[in-house]
Image (spheres, rainbow, N blue to C red):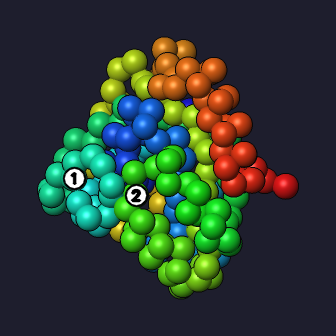
Amino acid sequence: MSASIGFKEWQVVCDALASGRQAILLRKGGIHEGRQGFSFAHESFFLFPTRFHALADQIREGEVSLLPEWQPGDLIRITHHAEAIWAVTLTVLGQVAALVPYHIYAEKTVSERFNWEGKGMAAGSIHLALIRVRELATPWEFPYEANYGGCRSWVNLPPPPMDWMDSARTVIDDETFNLLEVRMAADGSFFPA
């Protein structure tokens, strides 16, 4: 089996996704995203919890543990997988503001990301993905490696445990998730054209 993909996100956001409190990802991208900048280049990925950059004033709810970033040899614990249902790039601040009910980020954090420019990313834009999160029946653990570090969104992971998908369960039931999709469409026309 080939290597799998991890999406690096603050631990506190991974916790919100795991609890069903959040079902979207907002991303501008990291400084190591390459010349083209960030995109939701993968439809299927494991949530890779990171402590990098996370500060309590950057979220509206949840708790940030001020811990040092992972070091080589530390044990990483992957508990959730995500599937991007759709992804778009938003360029209208009003659409971004309408997302408040769907995430835990502080208004300042979202605004800074929307207005940031660099590394192939234009000011006045942010990437949005609606994701379906599944909890692994058994957490997947492996040692942290230096190549997982840096300000990047995507990392190549070792092959996951066999049959992990067979026992994974969605954190938001089908009916609730379908209602969320409909509500998001009504709130801000976020669906791709």
Which residue occupies 39% across, 71% down? 108
Q: Quadrant of the N terminus?
A: top right
Which residue occupies 54% across, 15% down? 166
Q: Quadrant of the C terminus?
A: bottom right
> Does residue 87 appear in the picture of this structure?
yes
Which residue occupies 15% across, 57% down? 66
Give the amino acid type for the residue marked by disc 1 in the picture.
Val
Residue bearing mark 2: 105
Q: Is residue 92 above or below residue 64?
A: below
In the rendered structure, the answer to whether residue 23 lies left or right of residue 185 reads left
Q: Secondary structure at mark 1?
A: loop
Disc 1 crowd rating (10 Å Cα; few below 14, some 14-19, many 20+) is: some
**Of the pair 72 and 44, the residue shown nearer to us:** 44
Instruction: Report x, y in % for residue 53.
Output: 29, 66
Residue bearing mark 1: 64
Instruction: Report x, y in % for residue 12.
Output: 31, 48
Q: Are marks 1 and 2 in contact (CB under 8 Å)?
A: no
Q: Which mark is residue 140?
A: none
Give the amino acid type for the residue marked by disc 2 in the picture.
Tyr
Q: Secondary structure at mark 2?
A: loop
Task: Classify residue 180 by image quadrant.
Answer: top right
Q: Is residue 57 above or below residue 4?
A: below
